[in-house]
Image: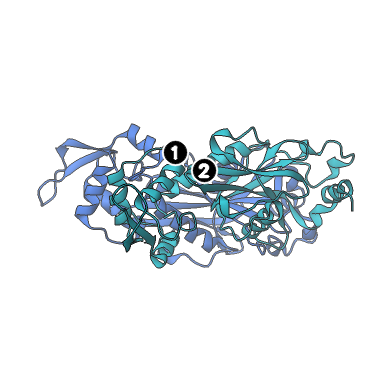
Chain colours: A cyan, B blue
């Protein structure tokens, strides 16, 4: 099936498979060596956007986000967190259908509400691949995100705000750092997400008070300075904190 | 217009006004004198539910939640916080249409995704009134919530979880307590929301460290014990913390 017929079928008959009016969009943050990036797709018409898609009639919205991300970028096994639903009245899909003669009859031709999901991954460990609608899929520096379609820039901002707030009550770092890491390495992860410097002593005190770190007997070797302690996450306590929140006080 | 014709028009022509497939539901928590309650409506068929409704084509989903709450319960000026979107595939609306002959043609007859909002109000200050679809609108003790329609019990649970987590990074109390209050009164508010006892000294230390309270020169009078200090919220700092989060550490 050529690409044009495939697109036409999708526009005119897609509502047999997908619910109209509801979409999902994924903000995938990538961390690697003190850098924080976001994953963007480029449509064949040149415009950049978040990887997003639609909800099959027989799947949950959470499952549709996972499938969409997999189909559009080939990223697998990513834990996605729903963070906000975007529902401004001018979220029209009709605009992108020009060039398709009957597009006004399409289920896509009108307002959509979009459910946003985010994730944080180690970007050197994954290899995103664009789908048939797109010609590129890249990690972008968060400070250099281009103008995106619709309200996708707002989605990136909101997801970043939620990710930063989540540090107040959820742990971060598992799957982003090596299994064994030093306190300065953990601090740089937090500093990169928050985009600001943190006080070394306060950071260490706070991290140790959370009760999710295990200090190892071995120390890191190879540096010029006194060898720093190595830590690892206590997986059970980490997972409990992911579920219940860190309860920093209450 | 009699009620049956009104309902029939809504079911068969409502999609001229409202988007199909998307609804909103409101979990309104009420606090008063160490009690936490939730506001429920009873349909004329006897089943209890959250106050919910639909999204007009020309309004944002956030505005539709405010309007819905006002129309269904007569509650005004409530700040609603979007907390989660519920999208299980078996969220069918068709089931409630029995008795209406053409109900399969209705825009309501199929799956809906629902966007959840919550709020916390002083329940003695508001006077909820049921709309034309309902015959009662009551505050229910959170420990005695009855079986609700669809997934509305799950919505109440999830909203409560989010409200409790929000205490980790957002202040609470403004509009719930008297303008001037004692530390034990503030502590009882937190204990009521969290449904557990808190240590008095840790609570006071933590609250004072947040920098949103102002200690007054006057003390509370009338009690048998030594008169306790009175506090009030520093409104500017409180509002900044509502927006930016308390940042308990970072």
Residue nearest the viewer, comparing B237 with A185: A185
Q: Residue at x 31, y 41 (%)?
A: A199
Identify the element where label 2 is drawn. strand
What is the chain identity of the residue bearing mark 1?
A
Is the Cβ of the residue at disc 1 closer than 8 Å to that at disc 2? Answer: yes
Residue B71, image quadrant: top right
Figure check: A113 above or below A212: above
**Quadrant of image for the C terminus of chain B:** top left
Give the x, y percent position of residue B218. Answer: 15, 36
Crowding around mark 1 (Cα neighbors within 10 Å: few <14, some 14 to 19, many 20+) is few
Determine which residue is flagged by label 1. Answer: A195
- Left or right: A59 in relation to A231: right
Residue nearest the viewer, comparing A43 with A84: A43
Residue B182, image quadrant: top left
Determine which residue is flagged by label 2. Answer: A36
Is residue B1 in view from this perspective?
no
Q: Which is nearer the N-term, disc 1 or disc 2?
A: 2
């Amino acid at each position: 099936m050529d690409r044009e017929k495939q697109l036409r079928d999708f526009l005119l008959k897609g509502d047999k498979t997908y619910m109209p009016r509801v979409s999902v969009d994924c903000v995938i943050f990538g961390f690697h060596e003190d850098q924080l990036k976001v994953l963007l797709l480029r449509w064949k018409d040149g415009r950049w956007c978040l990887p997003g898609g639609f909800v099959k009639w027989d799947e949950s919205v959470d499952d549709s986000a996972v499938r969409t991300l997999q189909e559009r970028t080939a990223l697998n096994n990513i834990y996605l967190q729903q963070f906000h639903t975007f529902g401004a009245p001018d979220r029209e899909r009709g605009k992108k259908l020009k060039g398709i003669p009957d597009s006004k009859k399409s289920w896509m031709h009108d307002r959509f509400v979009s459910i946003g999901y985010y994730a944080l991954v180690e970007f050197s460990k994954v290899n995103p691949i664009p789908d048939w609608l797109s010609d590129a899929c890249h990690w972008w520096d968060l400070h250099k995100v281009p103008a995106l379609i619709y309200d996708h820039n707002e989605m990136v901002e909101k997801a970043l705000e939620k990710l930063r707030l989540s540090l107040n009550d959820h742990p971060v770092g598992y799957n982003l750092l090596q299994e064994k890491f030093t306190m300065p390495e953990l601090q740089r992860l937090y500093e990169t997400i928050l985009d600001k410097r943190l006080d070394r002593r306060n950071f260490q005190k706070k991290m140790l008070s959370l009760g999710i770190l295990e200090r190892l007997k071995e120390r890191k070797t190879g540096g010029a300075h006194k060898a720093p302690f190595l830590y690892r996450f206590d997986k059970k306590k980490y997972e409990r904190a992911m579920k219940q929140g860190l309860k920093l006080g209450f």
